[in-house]
Every structure is written in C-alpha cells, then in structure tokens.
C-alpha cells in the first residue's frame, strides 16, 4: 500500500512540475505576443503565427489543469485529509477564468480581425494573474498535504 501511495504521489508531483513548466512556456508566449505591439504595425503573418501558438498553448494548459492536475491534487488532499479536498470556491474562481480564456481562444483562434486584440490581451492578463494566484493556492495545499503524508508515513 505504501509503495502505491508513494508512486501516486511521485506521478502527481511529476505532473504538477510538467504543468508548471507549461505555465512558464505559456507566460513566455504571452510576453512574446505582447512584444509585437502596436499590433496594427506588426508583421501580420508573424503576429498571426504568434497568436495561434499562444492560443494552442493556452488551451493545452487549461486542459491539463482541468482534466488532470486538479484531479490529482484533489486525490492527494483527500488521501491526506479527507475533509479538506479542493476548496469549492477556489475551483469556481478558476472555472470562471477558464471561461474567459476559452472565450479569448474562440475569438482569436482563427480570426484575422485583430482590432480589439490589445484590449482583450490586457483583460486576459488580469484574469490570468488572478488564476495563477488561485492555482498557486492549490499547489501549496498539495505540497502541505504531501509533507503531512510523508510525516505520517515515517511515524507509522
């Protein structure tokens, strides 16, 4: 049983680390996209390519979080402290930012009209900054649960 729990924790830790690396890649792509301002004067082909790359990374990041990371973190928290789980409020806040990010993706994934891109990127940046804070809360909870689990395993 202990090795199974340890294996799940190791896999979850690897998954979280991969997700954090993906987050960094997404932030770099966002910064690269913003560096092309003013968008009206940017090389259209390069801007569209950068925008498409950012949208793809955004959807991949959101998907990994929602379909794998949150589940692993929730499982880890429940194993260590069944009454805790992931706070519903935090998940709802993250879900709201997901809707905003997916709306951005839907608008710009295949669109050539970029007249509102600067305003939409600014709004997305504010939304994502808050999301990252909530995700960091989840990661901190996961890490505390992992430490508590190790301490319990050593004392058992």
Image (spheres, rainbow, N blue to C red):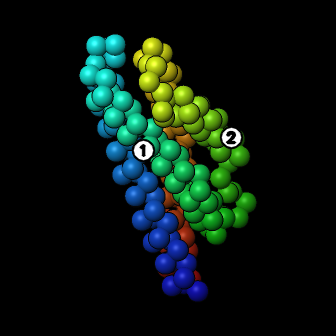
Residue in the picture at 52% in, 54% down: 64
User: Which quadrant holds the C terminus?
Assistant: bottom right
Q: Which of 13 and 69 is in front in this view?
A: 69
Q: In screen coordinates, is 120 left or right of 25?
A: right
Q: Is residue 116 above or below residue 8?
A: above
**Which residue in the structure is indicated by mark 1?**
57
Mark 2 element type: helix
Earlier-in-chain disc, 1 versus 2: 1
Q: In screen coordinates, is 39 left or right of 113?
A: left
Residue in the picture at 62% in, 35% down: 99
Q: Where is residue 135? Give x, y as percent.
A: 52, 45
The label number, if any, that marks residue 92 in the structure image: 2
Q: Where is residue 13? Give x, y as percent.
A: 45, 64
The answer to whether residue 127 is seen in the rendering is no
Residue in the picture at 49% in, 66% down: 12
Q: Is residue 108 above or below residue 153?
A: above
Q: Nearer the viewer, residue 85 or 128?
A: 128
Q: Which of 81 and 106 is in front in this view?
A: 106
Q: In screen coordinates, is 126 left or right of 23?
A: right
Q: Where is residue 104? Give x, y as percent.
A: 53, 30
Residue in the picture at 40% in, 58% down: 18
Q: In screen coordinates, is 156 left or right of 30?
A: right
Number of the front mark, 1 or 2: 1
Q: Nearer the viewer, residue 1 or 25?
A: 25
The answer to whether residue 9 is seen in the rendering is yes
User: Which quadrant holds the N terminus?
Assistant: bottom right
């Amino acid at each position: 049983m202990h090795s199974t729990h340890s294996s799940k924790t190791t896999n979850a830790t690897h998954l979280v680390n991969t997700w954090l690396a993906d987050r960094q890649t997404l932030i770099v792509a966002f910064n690269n996209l913003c560096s092309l301002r003013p968008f009206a004067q940017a090389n259209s082909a390069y801007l569209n390519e950068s925008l498409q790359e950012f949208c793809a990374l955004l959807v991949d990041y959101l998907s990994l979080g929602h379909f794998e990371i949150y589940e692993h973190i929730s499982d880890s928290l429940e194993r260590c402290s069944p009454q805790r789980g992931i706070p519903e409020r935090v998940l709802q806040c993250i879900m709201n930012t997901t809707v905003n990010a997916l709306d951005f993706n839907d608008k710009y994934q295949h669109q050539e009209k970029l007249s509102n891109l600067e305003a939409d990127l600014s709004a997305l940046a504010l939304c994502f900054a808050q999301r990252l804070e909530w995700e960091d809360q989840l990661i901190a909870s996961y890490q505390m649960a992992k430490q508590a689990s190790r301490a319990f395993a050593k004392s058992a």
